[in-house]
Amino acid sequence: MALDRIEILIEKYFEGETSIAEEKELKNYFSSSNVAQHLEQYSAVFGYYKQAKNEQLATTIPLKSKKQSIVVWLSVAASVVVMLGVGFTFYKNNLNTEIQNVGKVDDPEIAFRETQKALDLVSKHLNKGIESVSYLNEFEQSKNKIFKIN
């Protein structure tokens, strides 16, 4: 009768349906010396718990203190902030000098020529825009003819 119960518990164990008490019963059965011969193949599975219980770690693991890691992270963060500050200062100074020098022309003739170039460019793009609007006017006239709106 006990052998039938153990076989049922083994099936339940491998299907993942056993309770803690049933697993303890299996562990106790396979730890004993009177294991049925056809069930000895499972002794390694349940005997592992007994063996693992007796194992001990022989080496020591050095633990780092949290204070050291906090100091390291704070120093890294501080150096990043300093680098960002220096970089931003250089960027801002270079940007200001470039903006101050834009558009400064001392010779009036050069300034006049540059102004003419800029106005030509604006005129060219403005004419393209006006051409596009003329297509809209034709579209409006065609729409009015189709729908007879006047």
Image: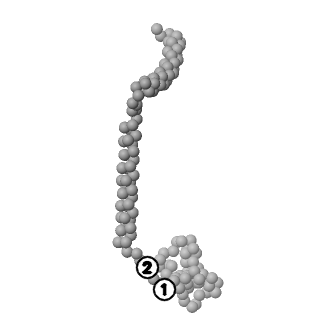
- Identify the residue at image location x=36%, y=57%: 82
Residue at 54% in and 87% down: 31
Q: Position of residue 13 (x, y in %)?
A: 55, 75
Residue assigned mark 2: 62
Q: Can residue 143 be seen in this view?
A: no
The residue identified by callout 1 is 58
Which of the two residues, 106 or 137, is positioned nearer the viewer here? 106
> Residue type at mark 2?
Pro
- Secondary structure beneath dot 1 equals loop
Of the two numbered discs 1 and 2 in the rendering, the one whose residue sits closer to the viewer = 2
| Residue 85 location (% of width, % of height) | 36, 53
Q: Position of residue 66 (x, y in %)?
A: 37, 72
Q: Is mark 2 on a helix, strand or loop?
A: loop
Disc 1 crowd, CA 10 A, few/some/many (<14, 14-19, 20+): few
Which residue is the extreme one toward the bottom? 33
Quadrant in the picture for residue 32:
bottom right
Instruction: Say whether residue 128 is left or right of residue 103.
Output: right
Looking at the image, the residue that sits furthest to the top is 150
Q: Is residue 68 toward the left or the right of residue 123 in the image?
A: left
Taking the spot 51% from the left edge, 79% from the top edge, the residue there is: 23
Where the N terminus falls, by quadrant?
bottom right
- Cα–Cα gap, marks 1 and 2: 13 Å
| 72 horizontally vs 13: left or right | left
Q: Nearer the viewer, residue 31 or 36?
A: 31
The one nearer the camera, 71 or 23, is 71
Residue located at (40% from left, 40% from top): 98
Classify 10 Å Cα crowding around label 2: few (below 14), some (14-19), many (20 and above): few
Residue 5 is at least partly visible in this image: yes
